[in-house]
Each structure stands twice: as C-alpha cells, then as structure tokens.
Amino acid sequence: MNSNANISISRLQLRHFRCFEQFEAEFAPGVNFIIGPNAHGKTSLLEAVCILLRLQSPRVSQLARVVQHGRRGFVTDGYFGARHLQFYYGTQRKKLALDGVELAGAREWLQIARVMWFGNDDIELVRGSAEKRRRFLDFVALQRDATYRPSLRAFEHALRSRNHLLKQPSPRWREIAAFDAPLIEHGNTVSAARAALIEELQGEADSAHHAISGKRESLRMEYARGDAGDFAAALAAAKTEDARLRQTTTGPHRDDVRFLLNNLPSDDASEGQQRTLVLALKLGAARLLEHHFGPPPVLLLDDIFGELDPARRNALLAALPDGAQKIITTTHLEWMPNFSNSQVLQLG
Ligand SMILES: Nc1ncnc2c1ncn2[C@@H]1O[C@H](COP(=O)(O)OP(=O)(O)O)[C@@H](O)[C@H]1O
Ligand SMILES: [Mg+2]
C-alpha cells in the first residue's frame, strides 16, 4: 500500500447531500480527478470531502444549505487512513461517530485531518468583501491551532448576545455591559491568533508566490484590526455609535487583511497578478499546515486549472506538496498531458 494511504481519504459515501440522493466514491492516495459536465456535482463532491474532514463548507457558512432540497439532513461517511468518520447533519440535530463510537464534541475529530481548498472564485479573496478574507483566515487558523475554535465560538456567542440586546427597543446598558468582558477576552485571543497566523502565512505565501510566478515580486500581508489594536478602549469609545447603529461596531468581526505586491495594494494589480496572489495564499496556507503537522493537508482543487495559462498551471502543479493527496475537479482533461497514474472518477 502507498505510504500516503494513512494521510488520505479512501472512501466517501453520501446521502441527501446537495444533488446526490445517494453516492459512493473511492479515492487514491495520490492524484484524483473528478471529471464531468457542469452541474453534475463535481464541486459538491469536493465540498463533501471538506465537510467530512473539517465539518465546515468552503462554500457556505450554513450547513443547512447543503442538505438536499426537501430532506431533513445529510450523511457524509468515509475513511481517512484507518479512521472511520461518520457525520450526520440534520436541521434538528447533528451526530459524529468516530470508528463507530459517537462523540460528544468535535475536538478529537478535527485533529484527524486537514484540508486546503482552491476554488475558481478565490480571486474574491482580493476583490471581495473583508468577510471573505476573515473566513479564509479562520479556515486556516481553525486547522493550525485546536484552541482557536473555542475562543472563536465564545467570541461569536458574546457578540451575538450583545448585538441582540442592542437591538431591543430601549437597550439596557447594564445587561449589555455584562457581555463586554467575555467579548474582550475572547476577542483579544482571536486577534492574537489571527496576527500570529498572518505573520507566519506571509512568509509561506511569499515563497509560494515566487514559486508560481517565477518573479522576484514581494508579497506582503498586513493585518488591519477592527479595533485599531486595543479592543477594550475601542469598545468603550464606540458606545454612542453602538447605541445609534444598534450593533457592536468595533472588534475582530471587523478585521481585514491587506495584500501588498511590491509594496502596492493588490487592488491595483492586474487580474493575472491577483490570480497568482490568491494561488500563493492557498499554497502558502497548505505549506504552513504541512510544517505544523508533518503530513500535508488534503488538497481540494475545484476547477482552477482550465483558466490558468500553461506556465502557471505547470508551476502550480510542481509547487503542490509532494506527498499530499490531491482531488481535482475539471470538465475535461485536455490540459493535463499525463494523468495515466491518476485515479479518474467520471460523473455523468
Ligand atoms: N441543496 C441542494 N439540493 C439539491 N440540489 C442542489 C443543492 N445544492 C445544489 N444543488 C444542485 O447540485 C447540482 C450540482 O452542483 P455542483 O456541484 O456545483 O456541480 P458542478 O461543480 O459539477 O458544476 C446543481 O445542479 C445544483 O443546482
Ligand atoms: Mg463546480
């Protein structure tokens, strides 16, 4: 058996998952292609791998959207190495079973595997809203450090509670202030983790950028904190504004990251430069996870090769971590000269 078999997903079964009533797929430890015409479920299948391994979709924040229309829940069931992962998500309840034993929480599960998602709309990381960038940062941070999840959740919980109170007809400040302490405590932990991640990711992304572009352009990342550096002070100063807008207007939920190519903002870069930048970010994140854990993450590449020119396509293929399992969706394989050693799954 291939030595990478213990760091790869080998079998996946789906039920009531997006367009799939019932589906079963086998994956090889190395390179896998999923081929099919549009709307045949290629992206959904890749998404299912991500959800099984990380309990999180790269496409939507609500897993309810993944449930097949008219159904109450979905099942993703598969093997990662020797571990048997079974996840049921229903609108009423969720269930995780690891090697046949039901788990009370996700902590142990989330330590099993890591993934990196490459999508054809990744350019939105540069062009889109700050929320997209925060989601990407969190997607990596959640994998990099197991302690990030409880902090992020506690922060989000305090934020939701505080915002709920601010929306009441006449906000009661004593109650609202009760959420300030947990908001600040967990918010500061979230900010510190994001800052550390950005610092580390910047180096990885910069060298990945060099590998893909072949140029000596520098890629830098700047953390633009939503609280300008002192959350407690910012929160106190925003009281009037929060009351007027009936929401918490400062904090990590307003964080952003800026990208600089040769010290120029990435908004001004060409489309080609922006595409290379986001590839470098994703590749850098994959390498960062590999450096932290030893085994590289499973790489899920959704329909990204068609639109790359041959030079960048080859550079990217060469730069992907060697031992990583790769699952690649595409409408056709004409761009891929040598796929005879790969597993090919045809949809439709
Ligand atoms: N929750 C859902 N229930 C049923 N069908 C869905 C759901 N979400 C998406 N679909 C359908 O799944 C099909 C496959 O989508 P997708 O995986 O994006 O295909 P591809 O990547 O092959 O183009 C689409 O026709 C879409 O309408
Ligand atoms: Mg697709």
Image (cartoon, rainbow, N blue to C red):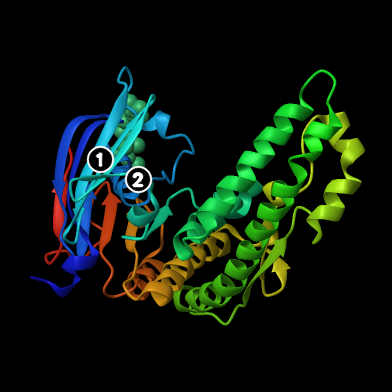
For the residue carrying disc 1, how many other residues have a C-alpha within 10 Å: few (<14), some (14-19), or many (20+)?
Answer: many
* Residue 188 badge: none
Amino acid carrying label 1: it is: Thr
| Disc 2 C-beta below 8 A from ligand 1 | no
Percent coordinates x, y for residue 316 in the rendering: 38, 69
Query: Quarter containing ligand 1?
Result: top left
* Residue 76 badge: 1
Q: Is residue 28 left or right of residue 151?
A: left
Residue 308 shows in this picture: yes
Label count reads 2
Q: Is residue 186 left or right of residue 244?
A: left
Residue at horizontal 65 percent and vertical 60 percent from the top: 189
Q: Is residue 29 left or right of residue 105?
A: left
| Disc 1 C-beta below 8 A from ligand 1 | no
Looking at the picture, tell me which residue is in the foreground, 217 or 150.
150
Residue tagged 2: 51
**Distance from the alpha carbon under mark 1 to that under mark 2:** 8 Å
Percent coordinates x, y for residue 168 in the rendering: 77, 21
**Residue 242: quadrant of the picture:** top right
Contact between labelled residues 2 and 1, with CB atoms less than 8 Å apart: yes
Residue at horizontal 28 percent and vertical 50 percent from the top: 330
Amino acid carrying label 2: it is: Ile
Residue 136 shows in this picture: no
Task: Indicate the secondary structure of the residue bearing disc 1.
Answer: strand
**Residue 23: quadrant of the picture:** top left
Looking at the picture, tell me which residue is in the foreground, 172 or 307.
172
